[in-house]
Protein backbone atom coordinates (compact mmCIF):
# COMPACT_ATOMS: atom_id res chain seq x y z
CA UNK A 1 0.00 0.00 0.00
CA UNK A 2 1.78 3.10 -1.28
CA UNK A 3 0.01 5.58 1.05
CA UNK A 4 1.06 3.52 4.08
CA UNK A 5 4.61 2.97 2.87
CA UNK A 6 5.10 6.66 2.14
CA UNK A 7 4.00 7.65 5.65
CA UNK A 8 6.13 4.90 7.21
CA UNK A 9 9.10 6.14 5.16
CA UNK A 10 8.72 9.65 6.57
CA UNK A 11 8.04 8.45 10.13
CA UNK A 12 11.24 6.37 10.23
CA UNK A 13 13.19 9.59 9.61
CA UNK A 14 12.02 10.81 13.05
CA UNK A 15 14.33 10.14 16.02
CA UNK A 16 13.71 6.92 17.98
CA UNK A 17 11.23 5.57 15.44
CA UNK A 18 12.19 2.40 13.57
CA UNK A 19 10.16 0.56 10.96
CA UNK A 20 8.10 -1.43 13.48
CA UNK A 21 7.17 1.65 15.55
CA UNK A 22 6.39 3.56 12.34
CA UNK A 23 4.04 0.79 11.22
CA UNK A 24 2.31 0.74 14.63
CA UNK A 25 1.87 4.51 14.47
CA UNK A 26 0.55 4.36 10.88
CA UNK A 27 -1.94 1.61 11.77
CA UNK A 28 -3.03 3.57 14.82
CA UNK A 29 -3.73 6.61 12.62
CA UNK A 30 -5.63 4.37 10.17
CA UNK A 31 -7.78 3.00 13.00
CA UNK A 32 -8.38 6.33 14.75
CA UNK A 33 -11.08 8.77 13.70
CA UNK A 34 -10.68 11.30 10.88
CA UNK A 35 -10.50 14.21 13.35
CA UNK A 36 -7.37 12.87 15.04
CA UNK A 37 -5.46 12.43 11.76
CA UNK A 38 -6.58 15.89 10.61
CA UNK A 39 -5.55 17.50 13.93
CA UNK A 40 -2.16 15.77 13.90
CA UNK A 41 -1.47 16.86 10.30
CA UNK A 42 -2.57 20.41 11.11
CA UNK A 43 -0.39 20.67 14.24
CA UNK A 44 2.69 19.41 12.40
CA UNK A 45 2.11 22.02 9.71
CA UNK A 46 1.44 24.77 12.29
CA UNK A 47 4.52 23.98 14.37
CA UNK A 48 7.05 25.41 11.97
CA UNK A 49 4.99 28.49 11.15
CA UNK A 50 4.11 29.42 14.74
CA UNK A 51 7.45 28.79 16.42
CA UNK A 52 10.38 31.07 15.58
CA UNK A 53 13.84 31.70 17.02
CA UNK A 54 14.23 34.43 19.66
CA UNK A 55 16.30 37.17 18.03
CA UNK A 56 18.17 37.76 21.31
CA UNK A 57 19.02 34.31 22.70
CA UNK A 58 18.05 31.92 19.87
CA UNK A 59 15.44 29.98 21.89
CA UNK A 60 12.32 28.52 20.29
CA UNK A 61 9.50 30.95 20.95
CA UNK A 62 6.07 32.01 19.79
CA UNK A 63 6.74 35.69 20.59
CA UNK A 64 10.03 37.49 19.80
CA UNK A 65 11.88 38.23 22.08
CA UNK A 66 11.12 35.05 24.03
CA UNK A 67 9.42 35.08 27.47
CA UNK A 68 12.75 34.57 29.26
CA UNK A 69 14.53 37.43 27.48
CA UNK A 70 11.59 39.77 28.05
CA UNK A 71 10.90 38.76 31.66
CA UNK A 72 11.62 41.49 34.24
CA UNK A 73 12.17 38.86 36.97
CA UNK A 74 15.15 37.04 35.41
CA UNK A 75 18.70 37.70 36.59
CA UNK A 76 20.28 39.66 33.69
CA UNK A 77 23.80 39.26 35.04
CA UNK A 78 23.81 35.52 34.23
CA UNK A 79 23.82 34.00 30.72
CA UNK A 80 23.68 30.24 30.26
CA UNK A 81 25.26 29.07 26.96
CA UNK A 82 23.56 25.96 25.56
CA UNK A 83 24.13 23.87 22.46
CA UNK A 84 20.58 23.85 21.09
CA UNK A 85 17.20 25.49 21.76
CA UNK A 86 15.62 22.43 23.41
CA UNK A 87 18.33 22.47 26.09
CA UNK A 88 16.62 25.62 27.41
CA UNK A 89 13.38 23.69 27.90
CA UNK A 90 15.28 20.99 29.79
CA UNK A 91 17.01 23.51 32.07
CA UNK A 92 13.80 25.52 32.66
CA UNK A 93 12.10 22.29 33.77
CA UNK A 94 14.62 21.98 36.65
CA UNK A 95 13.45 25.38 38.01
CA UNK A 96 16.96 25.95 39.35
CA UNK A 97 18.27 28.61 37.01
CA UNK A 98 16.88 32.18 36.96
CA UNK A 99 19.22 33.88 34.48
CA UNK A 100 19.12 34.34 30.69
CA UNK A 101 20.21 31.99 27.89
CA UNK A 102 22.22 31.98 24.70
CA UNK A 103 21.91 29.23 22.10
CA UNK A 104 25.26 28.41 20.46
CA UNK A 105 23.61 26.46 17.66
CA UNK A 106 26.11 23.62 17.81
CA UNK A 107 29.41 22.52 19.35
CA UNK A 108 32.95 22.86 18.03
CA UNK A 109 33.76 19.57 16.33
CA UNK A 110 36.77 19.52 13.97
CA UNK A 111 35.89 15.95 12.91
CA UNK A 112 32.47 17.13 11.67
CA UNK A 113 33.98 20.28 10.21
CA UNK A 114 32.28 22.57 12.73
CA UNK A 115 34.51 25.44 13.84
CA UNK A 116 33.84 28.39 16.20
CA UNK A 117 32.79 30.55 13.24
CA UNK A 118 29.68 28.37 12.76
CA UNK A 119 28.46 29.05 16.31
CA UNK A 120 26.33 32.05 17.34
CA UNK A 121 29.24 33.74 19.09
CA UNK A 122 29.00 37.26 17.63
CA UNK A 123 25.56 37.70 19.20
CA UNK A 124 26.89 36.40 22.52
CA UNK A 125 29.87 38.76 22.52
CA UNK A 126 27.59 41.68 21.62
CA UNK A 127 25.37 40.85 24.60
CA UNK A 128 28.42 40.73 26.89
CA UNK A 129 29.60 44.13 25.65
CA UNK A 130 26.47 45.72 27.18
CA UNK A 131 28.27 45.28 30.53
CA UNK A 132 25.22 43.85 32.32
CA UNK A 133 26.48 40.26 32.26
CA UNK A 134 28.94 39.15 34.93
CA UNK A 135 28.92 35.33 34.40
CA UNK A 136 28.47 32.93 31.49
CA UNK A 137 27.46 29.43 32.63
CA UNK A 138 28.48 26.94 29.94
CA UNK A 139 25.92 24.11 29.89
CA UNK A 140 27.34 22.01 27.02
CA UNK A 141 27.27 18.22 27.43
CA UNK A 142 30.33 16.63 29.11
CA UNK A 143 31.56 15.18 25.80
CA UNK A 144 34.72 15.88 23.79
CA UNK A 145 32.83 18.45 21.67
CA UNK A 146 31.16 19.99 24.76
CA UNK A 147 34.50 20.22 26.58
CA UNK A 148 36.24 21.78 23.56
CA UNK A 149 33.49 24.36 23.15
CA UNK A 150 33.52 25.21 26.87
CA UNK A 151 37.28 25.75 26.79
CA UNK A 152 37.00 27.90 23.66
CA UNK A 153 34.32 30.05 25.32
CA UNK A 154 36.48 30.46 28.43
CA UNK A 155 39.42 31.75 26.33
CA UNK A 156 37.15 33.97 24.25
CA UNK A 157 35.17 35.53 27.09
CA UNK A 158 37.46 35.74 30.13
CA UNK A 159 39.66 38.55 28.72
CA UNK A 160 36.57 40.79 28.74
CA UNK A 161 36.30 40.34 32.53
CA UNK A 162 33.17 38.16 32.49
CA UNK A 163 33.45 34.94 34.57
CA UNK A 164 32.99 31.64 32.72
CA UNK A 165 31.71 28.63 34.69
CA UNK A 166 30.54 25.16 33.68
CA UNK A 167 27.86 22.78 34.99
CA UNK A 168 29.28 20.21 37.42
CA UNK A 169 30.05 16.74 36.06
CA UNK A 170 29.76 13.71 38.33
CA UNK A 171 27.69 10.80 39.54
CA UNK A 172 23.97 11.48 38.90
CA UNK A 173 21.67 11.92 41.91
CA UNK A 174 20.31 8.50 42.82
CA UNK A 175 23.12 6.90 40.82
CA UNK A 176 25.46 4.18 41.98
CA UNK A 177 29.28 4.23 42.10
CA UNK A 178 29.22 0.70 40.74
CA UNK A 179 27.51 1.78 37.53
CA UNK A 180 29.41 5.06 37.04
CA UNK A 181 31.83 4.83 34.13
CA UNK A 182 35.54 5.43 34.65
CA UNK A 183 35.55 8.94 33.15
CA UNK A 184 32.57 10.12 35.18
CA UNK A 185 34.18 8.76 38.34
CA UNK A 186 37.49 10.46 37.50
CA UNK A 187 35.71 13.77 36.89
CA UNK A 188 33.71 13.48 40.12
CA UNK A 189 36.99 13.01 42.03
CA UNK A 190 38.57 16.04 40.40
CA UNK A 191 35.42 18.07 41.07
CA UNK A 192 34.94 16.86 44.67
CA UNK A 193 33.43 19.47 46.99
CA UNK A 194 34.01 20.20 50.69
CA UNK A 195 31.28 18.90 53.00
CA UNK B 1 4.92 27.11 23.67
CA UNK B 2 1.34 26.23 22.82
CA UNK B 3 2.05 24.99 19.25
CA UNK B 4 4.67 22.59 20.59
CA UNK B 5 2.54 21.38 23.52
CA UNK B 6 -0.46 20.76 21.26
CA UNK B 7 1.59 18.59 18.90
CA UNK B 8 3.23 16.75 21.81
CA UNK B 9 -0.26 16.12 23.27
CA UNK B 10 -1.42 14.48 20.04
CA UNK B 11 1.84 12.54 19.55
CA UNK B 12 1.62 10.96 23.01
CA UNK B 13 -1.71 9.44 21.97
CA UNK B 14 0.18 7.33 19.42
CA UNK B 15 1.27 3.84 20.50
CA UNK B 16 4.77 3.52 21.97
CA UNK B 17 5.30 7.29 22.18
CA UNK B 18 5.68 8.82 25.64
CA UNK B 19 6.23 12.47 26.48
CA UNK B 20 10.01 12.35 26.02
CA UNK B 21 9.79 10.67 22.60
CA UNK B 22 7.04 13.08 21.56
CA UNK B 23 9.23 16.04 22.49
CA UNK B 24 12.18 14.59 20.55
CA UNK B 25 9.94 14.10 17.51
CA UNK B 26 8.51 17.63 17.80
CA UNK B 27 12.00 19.18 18.09
CA UNK B 28 13.15 17.12 15.13
CA UNK B 29 10.26 18.48 13.04
CA UNK B 30 11.11 22.01 14.21
CA UNK B 31 14.73 21.56 13.14
CA UNK B 32 14.01 19.85 9.82
CA UNK B 33 13.15 21.77 6.65
CA UNK B 34 9.67 23.02 5.80
CA UNK B 35 9.27 20.38 3.07
CA UNK B 36 9.61 17.49 5.52
CA UNK B 37 6.95 18.84 7.89
CA UNK B 38 4.64 19.56 4.96
CA UNK B 39 5.15 16.08 3.49
CA UNK B 40 4.55 14.39 6.85
CA UNK B 41 1.36 16.37 7.44
CA UNK B 42 0.16 15.62 3.90
CA UNK B 43 0.84 11.87 4.18
CA UNK B 44 -1.00 11.61 7.50
CA UNK B 45 -3.98 13.35 5.95
CA UNK B 46 -3.80 11.21 2.79
CA UNK B 47 -3.52 7.92 4.67
CA UNK B 48 -7.12 7.76 5.79
CA UNK B 49 -8.52 8.96 2.46
CA UNK B 50 -6.47 6.62 0.25
CA UNK B 51 -6.70 3.41 2.26
CA UNK B 52 -10.05 1.65 2.54
CA UNK B 53 -11.25 -1.75 3.74
CA UNK B 54 -11.50 -4.58 1.20
CA UNK B 55 -15.23 -5.33 0.83
CA UNK B 56 -14.49 -9.07 0.60
CA UNK B 57 -11.93 -9.83 3.32
CA UNK B 58 -11.72 -6.57 5.31
CA UNK B 59 -8.00 -5.96 4.66
CA UNK B 60 -6.54 -2.45 4.34
CA UNK B 61 -6.25 -1.73 0.63
CA UNK B 62 -5.91 1.05 -1.92
CA UNK B 63 -8.03 -0.85 -4.51
CA UNK B 64 -11.22 -2.76 -3.66
CA UNK B 65 -11.19 -5.77 -3.73
CA UNK B 66 -7.68 -6.03 -2.32
CA UNK B 67 -4.73 -7.49 -4.30
CA UNK B 68 -4.96 -10.79 -2.39
CA UNK B 69 -8.70 -11.27 -3.01
CA UNK B 70 -8.35 -10.39 -6.71
CA UNK B 71 -5.16 -12.39 -7.34
CA UNK B 72 -5.62 -15.40 -9.65
CA UNK B 73 -2.60 -17.15 -8.10
CA UNK B 74 -3.89 -17.47 -4.50
CA UNK B 75 -5.35 -20.73 -3.19
CA UNK B 76 -9.10 -20.01 -2.94
CA UNK B 77 -9.79 -23.16 -0.89
CA UNK B 78 -7.99 -21.66 2.14
CA UNK B 79 -9.22 -18.72 4.23
CA UNK B 80 -7.11 -17.44 7.13
CA UNK B 81 -9.21 -15.72 9.84
CA UNK B 82 -7.30 -12.88 11.54
CA UNK B 83 -8.19 -10.44 14.31
CA UNK B 84 -7.25 -7.19 12.56
CA UNK B 85 -6.17 -5.92 9.13
CA UNK B 86 -2.51 -5.45 10.04
CA UNK B 87 -2.24 -9.17 10.90
CA UNK B 88 -2.51 -9.81 7.15
CA UNK B 89 0.58 -7.68 6.52
CA UNK B 90 2.47 -9.64 9.20
CA UNK B 91 1.46 -13.01 7.71
CA UNK B 92 2.18 -11.89 4.13
CA UNK B 93 5.68 -10.90 5.21
CA UNK B 94 6.41 -14.53 6.19
CA UNK B 95 5.71 -15.60 2.56
CA UNK B 96 4.46 -18.95 3.84
CA UNK B 97 0.71 -18.66 3.27
CA UNK B 98 -0.81 -18.58 -0.23
CA UNK B 99 -4.56 -18.62 0.57
CA UNK B 100 -7.11 -15.86 1.17
CA UNK B 101 -7.91 -13.91 4.36
CA UNK B 102 -10.87 -12.80 6.44
CA UNK B 103 -10.61 -10.05 9.04
CA UNK B 104 -12.76 -10.75 12.10
CA UNK B 105 -12.47 -7.16 13.34
CA UNK B 106 -11.88 -8.21 16.94
CA UNK B 107 -11.89 -11.16 19.33
CA UNK B 108 -14.67 -12.48 21.56
CA UNK B 109 -14.06 -10.97 24.99
CA UNK B 110 -16.97 -11.10 27.46
CA UNK B 111 -15.00 -8.92 29.91
CA UNK B 112 -14.79 -6.13 27.31
CA UNK B 113 -18.38 -6.72 26.26
CA UNK B 114 -17.38 -8.06 22.82
CA UNK B 115 -19.59 -10.94 21.68
CA UNK B 116 -19.62 -12.95 18.40
CA UNK B 117 -22.26 -10.61 16.97
CA UNK B 118 -19.65 -7.80 16.88
CA UNK B 119 -17.28 -9.80 14.65
CA UNK B 120 -17.46 -9.92 10.84
CA UNK B 121 -18.87 -13.46 10.83
CA UNK B 122 -21.81 -13.06 8.45
CA UNK B 123 -19.43 -12.15 5.63
CA UNK B 124 -17.24 -15.14 6.49
CA UNK B 125 -20.17 -17.58 6.50
CA UNK B 126 -21.38 -16.14 3.17
CA UNK B 127 -17.94 -16.76 1.66
CA UNK B 128 -17.97 -20.36 2.95
CA UNK B 129 -21.42 -20.99 1.42
CA UNK B 130 -19.90 -20.50 -2.05
CA UNK B 131 -18.49 -24.03 -1.57
CA UNK B 132 -14.99 -23.11 -2.78
CA UNK B 133 -13.41 -23.00 0.70
CA UNK B 134 -12.35 -26.29 2.30
CA UNK B 135 -10.32 -25.01 5.29
CA UNK B 136 -10.39 -22.00 7.61
CA UNK B 137 -7.04 -21.38 9.34
CA UNK B 138 -7.67 -19.46 12.56
CA UNK B 139 -4.68 -17.14 13.17
CA UNK B 140 -5.86 -15.42 16.37
CA UNK B 141 -3.25 -14.83 19.08
CA UNK B 142 -2.74 -17.60 21.66
CA UNK B 143 -4.51 -15.59 24.39
CA UNK B 144 -7.73 -16.25 26.30
CA UNK B 145 -9.67 -14.10 23.80
CA UNK B 146 -7.90 -15.67 20.80
CA UNK B 147 -8.57 -19.17 22.13
CA UNK B 148 -12.25 -18.40 22.83
CA UNK B 149 -12.71 -16.95 19.35
CA UNK B 150 -10.98 -19.94 17.72
CA UNK B 151 -13.24 -22.38 19.59
CA UNK B 152 -16.31 -20.37 18.65
CA UNK B 153 -15.30 -20.41 14.98
CA UNK B 154 -14.72 -24.18 15.11
CA UNK B 155 -18.25 -24.78 16.47
CA UNK B 156 -19.79 -22.32 13.99
CA UNK B 157 -18.01 -23.53 10.85
CA UNK B 158 -17.40 -27.28 11.24
CA UNK B 159 -21.10 -28.27 10.82
CA UNK B 160 -20.91 -26.85 7.29
CA UNK B 161 -18.21 -29.40 6.41
CA UNK B 162 -15.33 -26.90 6.22
CA UNK B 163 -12.24 -27.87 8.24
CA UNK B 164 -11.10 -25.45 10.95
CA UNK B 165 -7.40 -25.38 11.92
CA UNK B 166 -5.28 -23.11 14.10
CA UNK B 167 -1.70 -21.85 13.95
CA UNK B 168 0.67 -23.95 16.09
CA UNK B 169 1.59 -22.61 19.53
CA UNK B 170 5.00 -23.41 21.02
CA UNK B 171 8.55 -22.30 21.65
CA UNK B 172 9.58 -19.66 19.09
CA UNK B 173 12.31 -20.53 16.57
CA UNK B 174 15.64 -19.53 18.11
CA UNK B 175 13.96 -19.45 21.52
CA UNK B 176 15.17 -21.14 24.67
CA UNK B 177 13.34 -23.67 26.87
CA UNK B 178 14.69 -21.80 29.88
CA UNK B 179 12.89 -18.61 28.92
CA UNK B 180 9.65 -20.20 27.68
CA UNK B 181 6.79 -19.50 30.10
CA UNK B 182 4.90 -22.39 31.70
CA UNK B 183 1.83 -22.10 29.47
CA UNK B 184 3.85 -22.00 26.25
CA UNK B 185 5.81 -25.03 27.38
CA UNK B 186 2.61 -26.91 28.30
CA UNK B 187 1.12 -26.11 24.91
CA UNK B 188 4.26 -27.15 23.06
CA UNK B 189 4.10 -30.52 24.83
CA UNK B 190 0.46 -31.02 23.90
CA UNK B 191 1.20 -30.03 20.32
CA UNK B 192 4.39 -32.09 20.00
CA UNK B 193 5.02 -33.47 16.50
CA UNK B 194 6.55 -36.73 15.33
CA UNK B 195 10.13 -36.46 14.04
Image (cartoon, coloured by chain):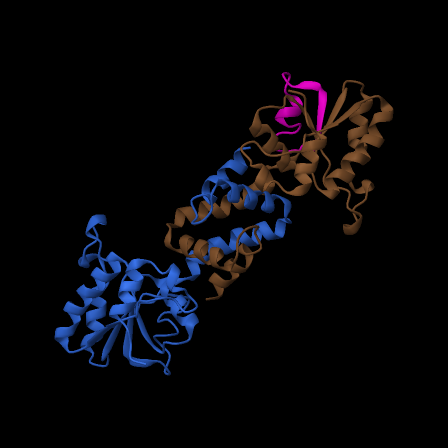
Chain colours: A blue, B brown
Q: Nearer the viewer, residue A192 or B135?
A: A192
B151 left or right, relative to A43: right
Identify the residue at horizontal 67%, vertical 33% (top origin).
B188
Can residue B139 be seen here? The reply is no
Name above or below for residue B193 compared with residue B176. above
Q: Position of residue A60 (x, y in %)?
A: 38, 64
Can residue B111 be seen here? The reply is yes
Q: Nearer the viewer, residue A109 or A143?
A: A143
Q: Which residues are magenta?
A: B54-80
Identify the residue at horizontal 68%, vertical 30% (top origin).
B167
Q: Position of residue A4 (x, y in %)?
A: 54, 38
Q: Nearer the viewer, residue A15 or B59?
A: A15
The question of residue A45 being in magenta is answered with no
Name above or below for residue A132 compared with residue B181. below
Q: Position of residue A139 (x, y in %)?
A: 30, 67
Res. B192 image quadrant: top right
Name above or below for residue B194 compared with residue A107. above
Residue at the farthest front position: B178
Identify the residue at horizontal 20%, vertical 77% (top origin).
A163
A116 left or right, relative to B64: left
The question of residue B65 being in magenta is answered with yes
Residue at the farthest left position: A159
Q: Position of residue A126 (x, y in %)?
A: 20, 72
Res. B122 image quadrant: top right
Res. B75 image quadrant: top right
Amino acid sequence: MRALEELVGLLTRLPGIGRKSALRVAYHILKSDEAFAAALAERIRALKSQIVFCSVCGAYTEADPCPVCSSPSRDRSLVCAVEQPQDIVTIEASREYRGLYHVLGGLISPLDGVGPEQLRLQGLMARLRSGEVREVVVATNPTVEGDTTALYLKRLIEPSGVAVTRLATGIPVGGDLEYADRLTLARSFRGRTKL
